Image: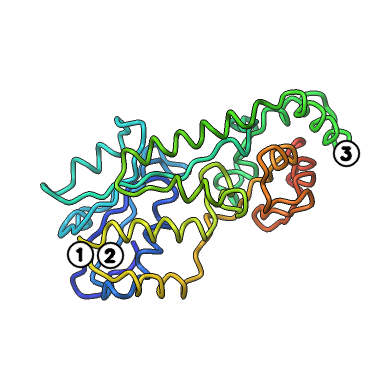
């Protein structure tokens, strides 16, 4: 829960994936709402170690001013059904899309080798790489493994322009079903800004833009002023989503024209800062020495 420090704040439910709590945090920073609203995150997925998504407590469904609902293609999501069943009748709803771009990581797959590690609830390497797993099976390690990865990944590289267009088409499809739109922002900026840290985790700048656009559409329900919103957002250090920035393959950088991304760019990986090559040298053997 974010904001709402007055005696009886009204609740704003923010339903969605892992982007939703960051949206709630940014909206709570808008001081022209006079702290009259408490932004409550309602996740659409289970958390580590849980079997189902948690539902906010009963008091969060009382005195609801607005619901911010993230569009999802899986309409029968049990988490969505559980939240919808608790919403007050005639509660206003503003829908917003999710940021999704899979084309930057064409070999991403589920990671089958995850080991329990209390320090890393999601795993040290939560995202799999199908080419890396094939190289792992050969027994290679170190520089030879990285070289073999580069050779095989170049042979297997799909048509990235086609993958990118699928991402763009998906974003426009989401926009068409929402009150808030994001596709134009992504198209205009993803080559020049490191917006996507993973296929669905965003930079602070992207989170800030999402909050800006949601706030503009929600203003008839929550109040506030556009000028003050900009002042508030400029004064807040927008939180990036988590501690992981998935390294981007150099060929993806080249083919998709990612101007923010140099071959020697380092990415945050928990407490580490690795280049793409550093990361692969550790991911392939599932190195846990760091």
Q: Which secondary structure lies at badge 2?
A: strand
Whichever of callouts 3 and 2 sits on the residue coming sooner in the sequence is: 2
Point out which mark residue 143 bears: 3
Question: How much space separates mark 1 and mark 3, taking CA atoms?
Answer: 57 Å
Q: Position of residue 271 (x, y in %)?
A: 68, 58
Question: How much space separates mark 1 and mark 2, taking CA atoms?
Answer: 6 Å
| In the image, farthest residue toward the left | 89
Q: Which residue is denoted by mark 2 in the rendering?
A: 38
Question: How much space separates mark 3 and mark 2, taking CA atoms?
Answer: 51 Å
Q: Which secondary structure lies at badge 1?
A: strand
Q: Which secondary structure lies at badge 3?
A: helix
Whichever of callouts 1 and 2 sits on the residue coming sooner in the sequence is: 1
Q: Position of residue 284 (x, y in %)?
A: 75, 35
Contact, mark 1 vs mark 2 (Cβ under 8 Å): yes
Q: Which residue is denoted by mark 1 in the rendering?
A: 10
Q: Nearer the viewer, residue 287 or 189?
A: 189
Relative to 285, is 4 on the left or the right? Answer: left
Residue at the spot 74% in from the left edge and 25% down from the top edge: 134
């Amino acid at each position: 829960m974010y904001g709402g420090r007055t005696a009886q704040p009204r609740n704003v439910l923010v339903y969605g994936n892992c982007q939703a709590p960051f949206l709630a945090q940014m909206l709570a920073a808008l001081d022209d709402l006079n702290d009259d609203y408490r932004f409550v995150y309602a996740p659409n997925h289970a958390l580590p170690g849980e079997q189902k998504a948690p539902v906010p407590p009963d008091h969060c469904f009382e005195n609801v001013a607005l619901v911010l609902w993230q569009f999802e293609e899986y309409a029968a999501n049990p988490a969505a059904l559980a939240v919808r069943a608790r919403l007050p009748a005639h509660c206003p709803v503003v829908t917003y899309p999710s940021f999704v771009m899979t084309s930057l990581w064409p070999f991403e797959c589920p990671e089958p080798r995850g080991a329990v590690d209390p320090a890393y609830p999601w795993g040290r390497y939560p995202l799999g790489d199908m080419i890396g797993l094939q190289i792992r099976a050969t027994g290679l390690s170190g520089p030879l493994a990285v070289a073999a990865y580069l050779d095989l990944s170049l042979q297997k590289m799909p048509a990235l322009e086609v993958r990118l267009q699928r991402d763009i088409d998906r974003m426009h499809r989401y926009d068409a079903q929402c009150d808030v739109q994001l596709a134009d922002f992504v198209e205009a900026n993803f080559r020049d800004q490191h917006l996507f840290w993973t296929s669905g985790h965003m930079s602070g700048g992207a989170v800030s833009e999402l909050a800006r656009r949601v706030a503009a559409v929600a203003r008839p329900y929550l109040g506030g002023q556009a000028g003050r919103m900009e002042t508030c957002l400029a004064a807040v250090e927008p939180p990036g989503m988590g501690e992981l920035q998935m390294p981007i393959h150099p060929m993806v950088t080249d083919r998709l024209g990612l101007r923010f991304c140099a071959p020697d760019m380092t990415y945050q990986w928990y407490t580490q800062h690795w280049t793409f090559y550093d990361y692969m040298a550790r991911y392939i053997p599932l190195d846990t020495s760091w």
